Amino acid sequence: MNPLKNTILKLNRLILALALTATILTLFNSFYSNYQVQKEQLILQSLESNMAYASKLSDTTEMFLRSSQQQLAFTANALSEQMSNSVRLNQEANRLKYQTDSFNSVVISNELGITKAASPEALNLVGVKLNSVGTTEALYEKKALISAPYISSINNLVVFMSEPIVGRDGDYLGFLGGTIYLKNLNILSEILGDHYYENGSYIYVVDKRRRFYTTLTLAVSVPRLLTTTA
């Protein structure tokens, strides 16, 4: 074979190989770039969807807390002249406890922290001096409060909501408090416990101390929490 033709043939093969390699690399780079773009778009869409869902849950939780606080405020105002009426106190405590599932327990305390009425009655708190984190804070602050989550004396993770009971002369008479057990069934757990993601994602709620509670085992909310999905 002519050496010149042989050289040209080899050169053509080399050029063809280079062209094919360049084409393959270009296609690979194109596919990879498209993959990265689509991946980023999917992540962005997921984050936006999660944010919208979390914001909705957060708003719903805030509405629940405001509604529960309004229930306590209305009843506390009605009790301002009933603190010596044990029958009326028991009726109001039971009404708040059983009318809705907002609270897992309800207590009415005098200005010294002694329980005047409680529901459910099985707690046997009447006549007992309250000294939990939530009740102590309520007695000290003497204003409407929602506590941070804490472990109660009977080892429940709880949030305590309270309203002061004030007489017509302005004297502090005690407080009305409702306890939300964060690991028990109530309206709040129904709000946060069931969600529509069935793709392996989960929901958790973070308090201002950056503690989080996953709804895989419980549902939690306290004021000014960030509710998120992941």
Image (cartoon, rainbow, N blue to C red):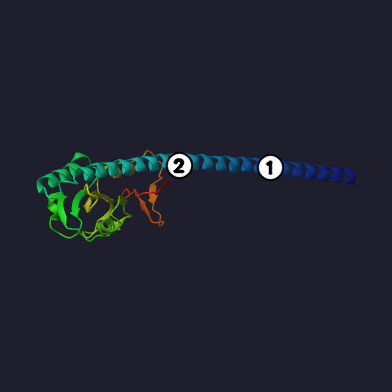
Q: Residue at x 43, y 41 (%)?
A: 55
Q: Say which label, 1 or 2, has the lower sequence index.
A: 1
In this figure, which residue is indicated by the disc labeled 2? 50
Which residue, as the protein is rendered here, is positioned at the far front?
Answer: 169
Closer to the camera in the image, 84 or 115 = 84
Residue 197 visible, this orientation: no
Tell how many labels.
2
Q: Hey, what amino acid is under mark 1?
A: Ile
Q: Determine whether label 1 and label 2 are within 8 Å by CB.
A: no
Q: Hey, what amino acid is under mark 2?
A: Asn
Question: Callout 2: 10 Å neighbours few (<14), some, many (20+)?
Answer: some
Residue 77 visible, this orientation: yes
Q: Residue at x 16, y 43 (%)?
A: 92
In this figure, which residue is indicated by the disc labeled 1? 24
Can you tell which of label 1 and label 2 is closer to the viewer? 2
Q: At which x and y percent is residue 34?
A: 61, 40
Q: Taking 5 as reference, is 227 left or right?
A: left
